[in-house]
Image: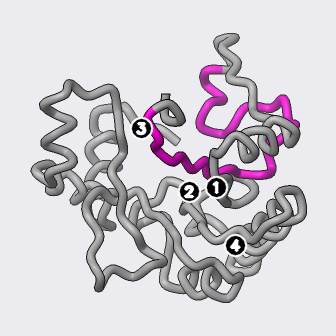
């Protein structure tokens, strides 16, 4: 559908799961119930790129950088870029932080992303970007199966207050709230 209407697409890939039959960490509970979400293979990834889907980096292990030692985070950032460039035969310019809220990456990670040679990096914080937005902390809108009216409101910025959940304070409050309700997730 994107190709039909001329819209570009980008897929951020954690390369540690390519050609792997193990579930991503956030899907282990589904796998335990027999629901398997097969990961993509390198060949399929290259085919997608040929079809016009831009492939960019999402690290290796799909773990938030803030959960890793600095040297391990540096490896995830740099090695994922290198491997993708080898397979795709072109520079990889963009990185997407795993989970992407302000609690899931730190200032040191911005430096590591810059040192690895990325031009831009995407967070999961909702909102618009401006000329003053740090290119290594770009916001984006997470598109869900919204009604047409809700979709219009999201794109108009009317829902930007929701992004407070992605701040360090919001993430902490969400964890406390989930723990109190007994609904904590990994």
> Along the polypeptide, which appears first: circle 3 or circle 2?
2
In this rendering, position of residue 88 left or right of residue 149: right
Examine the rendered structure and indicate whether residue 56 appears above or below residue 147: below
| Residue for point 77% across, 64% down | 80
User: For the residues marked 4 and 1, what is the alpha-carbon distance in whole angstroms?
Assistant: 9 Å
Observer-side mark, 2 or 1, equals 2
Q: Which residue is mark 2?
A: 98
Q: Is residue 74 above or below residue 174?
A: below
- What colouring method underlies this structural image? one colour
Secondary element under disc 4, as helix, strand or loop, is: helix
Q: Residues within 10 Å of mark 4 (few under 14, many from 20)?
A: many
Q: Going from the N terminus, do you reach mark 1 or mark 3 first?
A: 1
Q: Which residue is mark 4?
A: 73
The stretch in magenta equals 5-30
Q: Around disc 1, counting alpha carbons within 10 Å, would you say few (fewer than 14), some (14 to 19), or many (20 or more)? A: many
Where residue 57 appears, as percent x and y from the top left, is 67, 60
Q: Which residue is mark 3?
A: 184
Number of the front mark, 1 or 3: 1
* Quarter holding residue 41: top right
Instruction: Give the secondary structure at mark 1.
Output: loop
- Which residue lies at the image location 19% right of the left edge and 45% below the top edge? 154
Quick one: label 2 or label 4, which is nearer the N terminus? 4
Q: Could you tell me how far apart the alpha carbons at marks 2 and 1 are, in whole angstroms?
A: 6 Å
Q: Position of residue 67 (x, y in %)?
A: 60, 64
Instruction: Name the secondary structure under disc 3.
Output: loop
- Tell me the distance, in whole angstroms, between the alpha carbons under discs 2 and 4: 11 Å
Check whether the beta carbons of the residues at disc 4 and disc 1 lie within 8 A of each other.
Answer: no
Question: Could you tell which of marks 2 and 1 lies nearer the N-terminus?
Answer: 1
């Amino acid at each position: 559908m994107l190709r039909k209407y001329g819209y570009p697409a980008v897929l951020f890939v954690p390369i540690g799961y390519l050609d792997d039959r193990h579930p991503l960490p956030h899907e282990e509970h589904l796998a335990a119930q027999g629901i398997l979400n097969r990961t993509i293979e390198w060949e399929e990834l290259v085919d997608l790129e040929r079809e016009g889907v831009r492939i960019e980096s999402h690290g290796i292990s799909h773990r938030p950088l803030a959960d890793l030692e600095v040297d391990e985070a540096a490896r995830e950032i740099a090695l994922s870029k290198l491997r993708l460039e080898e397979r795709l035969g072109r520079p990889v310019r963009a990185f997407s932080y795993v989970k992407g809220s302000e609690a899931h990456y730190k200032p040191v990670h911005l430096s590591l992303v810059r040192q690895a040679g990325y031009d831009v990096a995407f967070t999961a914080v909702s909102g618009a970007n401006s000329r003053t937005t740090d290119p290594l902390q770009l916001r984006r809108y997470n598109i869900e199966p919204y009604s047409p009216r809700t979709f219009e409101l999201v794109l108009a910025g009317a829902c930007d207050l929701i992004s407070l959940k992605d701040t360090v304070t919001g993430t902490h409050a969400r964890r406390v709230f989930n723990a109190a309700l007994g609904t904590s997730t990994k």
